[in-house]
Image: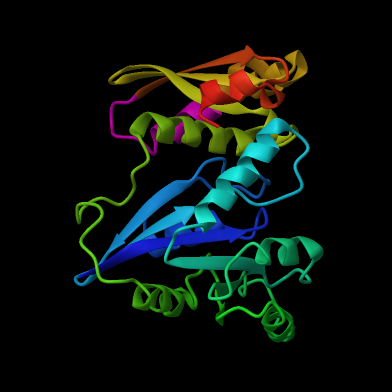
Amino acid sequence: MRSGFATLVGRPNVGKSTLLNKILHQKVSIVSDKPQTTRTQVRGVLTRDDVQVVFVDTPGIHKPKTLLGERLNDTAAQAVGDVDVVVLLIDATQPLGKGDRWVAKRTPPDALVAVNKTDKASQGQIIEQLIAASGLEKADYYPISAKTGDGVDVLVDAITARMPEGPLLYPADVVTDVPEAFWVAELVREQLLIAAREELPHSIAAQVTEWDWPRVRVEILVERDSQKGIVIGKGGSVLKEVGTAVRKQMPEGAFIELFVKVDKDWQRRAKALERLGY
């Protein structure tokens, strides 16, 4: 038996969470086209007959403007150390930029590079990006589409081949170690990013404050009164839409109560971030 850890890193919106979900054939990390959607290390477990890989999805590394941003970068940086494989994702549809190179410098020489979003890029763009990525001087390069799955199996085979000998790290039937309450709060935040697109996602947080199954109470935090109105929606329309979408992804019979609270500048206050688990 072989087992180990593989970390997915890259700039915001390169498709790390989408890739993790595709590898596991199950949604374990929320997805949005907004930056900083992933805020913590999310672990997903791939188990085959002779190998187990614990994948770690990380926040996108970026230039921080708040204390929250600084902590997201720290979370991503910590996930690069002491793992068996680092996979650096870059976007096939965007020129290789300073941000990509900055992240690349913080990955080891034996890292694998996944050039993602090939489904959206032309053949010429893919070739140009692979040539540009070769200048990062990493171990190997894989064109993939995390959305369609094209090339993902080849990448996964390369990752599993690098796993060292070792026992199962998780029971064979475990796909993620994300606590259920945390996952529900993440689902609420994901749907809010879809429904309340006018506001920056960094201003929204969610946490489960009561769990008395099937009743689950989720508190949504915003930073300003103006955001509260947008999140609630006219006649509570946004909250109803979010609650319906979340219930569809939970076991039958779940009852979700959503409440919105203003917590001024929560993403800049250490105590508020710690209370939220960031």
Q: Does the magenta segment cover residue 251?
A: yes
- Magenta range: 240-254
Above or below residue 178? Residue 164 is below
Quadrant of the snapshot with the C terminus = top right
Q: Residue furthest front?
A: 82
Q: Quadrant of residue 26?
A: bottom left
| Frontmost residue, 11 versus 271 | 271
Where's residue 149, x and y in %?
A: 47, 71
Q: Quadrant of residue 180?
A: top left
Where's residue 88, x and y in %?
A: 58, 67
Above or below residue 152? Residue 24 is above
Q: Is residue 107 left or right of residue 207?
A: right
Above or below residue 111? Residue 237 is above
Give the residue at x 69% y 86%: 127
Q: Is residue 216 visible?
A: yes
Q: Is residue 143 left or right of residue 21?
A: right
Q: Is residue 52 visible?
A: no
Give the residue at x 68% y 66%: 105
Where's residue 249, x and y in %?
A: 39, 39
Give the residue at x 68% y 46%: 35
Quadrant of the snapshot with the N terminus = bottom left
Where's residue 69, x and y in %?
A: 69, 38
Q: Is residue 75 left or right of residue 92?
A: left
